[in-house]
Amino acid sequence: MLASRPTARAAAAPAARARRAVRVVSFAQQPAATAVAANKASKPALTNGVIFRQLFDGASSTYTYLLADPLSLEAVLIDPVLEQAERDLEVVDGLGLNLVLTLNTHCHADHITGSGKLKALRPGVRSAIAAASGAAGDVQLRDGDSVPFGALALACIATPGHTSGCMSFYLPPAAPGAAGLVFTGDALLIRGCGRTDFQGGDAAGLYDTVHARLFSLPDDTLVLPGHDYRGRTASSIAEERALNPRLTKGRGEFVALMAGLGLPYPKQIDRALPANLEDGARFPYE
């Protein structure tokens, strides 16, 4: 279970963000989305005031996150993977939750989203992705939007740079003494960041948005990335601000480093990108 680590840093979001008008996203659910009932008398354990599970796809080293409001049991899945859709629903149903929404942090190049299959398996579930991604989704998200599930809500933080349409999702502390959670996709990884050499990537833009939008969150905010390749599961804003070997560099040095990585294209890019642009709707993909 993830532990909160209180610090002296102010827990409020920056004043400029607080003044921004917030659009509360509506995703009215169809009745058919009700989950298969589990024993709801057995309450799931909470992590920082929320029902939380971190799930992993070994083939793509992708983390999928399940979040649910402990009162209403409404749940969202962040970055689901096509091949893990049945597993994800087993977890949802085993906890007695009602899945209402799938969220993608960006249009992925290394796996096909599970959103389309999850919607087919559980009619009434809706999908959401940043409008700037150019990808299909039932809900097109903008910077500053609020995505509610039960009594909780995720704040949408545009974090372009890895791709032009990346969106991070911030869950403020959901209980006294708890830390907030930020789901960063590929914008900010544990001791690293996503590549910036395709899909409208921009190294300077990534550096600027991570420093301005993510590193301004409270120190104890838990960083939950879209991938990890070394078995690490979480970090914190304070850790990454102080210890991330890429993002502690100056802006010019960071841009030069990213330009010189020379990484091969993702193996699944030719299959994944077209599928994800249509919300993974025409599975199975060969």
Image (cartoon, rainbow, N blue to C red):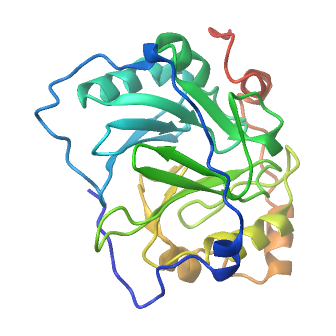
Q: Is residue 129 left or right of residue 78?
A: right
Q: Please give the name of the residue rendered at 51% of the width and 51% of the height, measured from the top-left corner.
A: 228
Give the mark count.
Answer: 0
Q: Above or below — where is 235 with respect to 135?
A: below
- Residue at the image position 85 percent from the left and 46 percent from the top: 198
Q: In the displayed structure, would residue 138 be above or below residue 131?
A: above
Query: Which residue lies most toward the left here?
Result: 41
Q: Where's residue 124, x and y in %?
A: 52, 18
Q: Position of residue 10 (x, y in %)?
A: 48, 86
Closer to the camera, 104 or 153?
153
Residue in front for this viewpoint, 285 or 52: 52
Is 44 on the left or on the right of 180, as rendered? left
Q: Position of residue 176 (x, y in %)?
A: 28, 71
Screen quadrant of the C terminus: top right
Q: Residue furthest bottom?
A: 8
Tell which of 84 and 78 is nearer to you: 78
Where's residue 168, x and y in %?
62, 55
Q: Is residue 246 visible?
A: no
Q: Is residue 25 left or right of residue 20?
A: left
Q: Residue at x 85, y 51 (%)?
A: 197
Location of residue 160 by image quarter: bottom right
Q: Residue at 67% x, 11% y: name it.
A: 285
Which quadrant is the N terminus positioned in?
A: bottom left
Most foreground residue, 103 or 280? 103
Residue 6 visible in the shown view: yes
Residue 182 lies left or right of residue 132; in this view the side is left
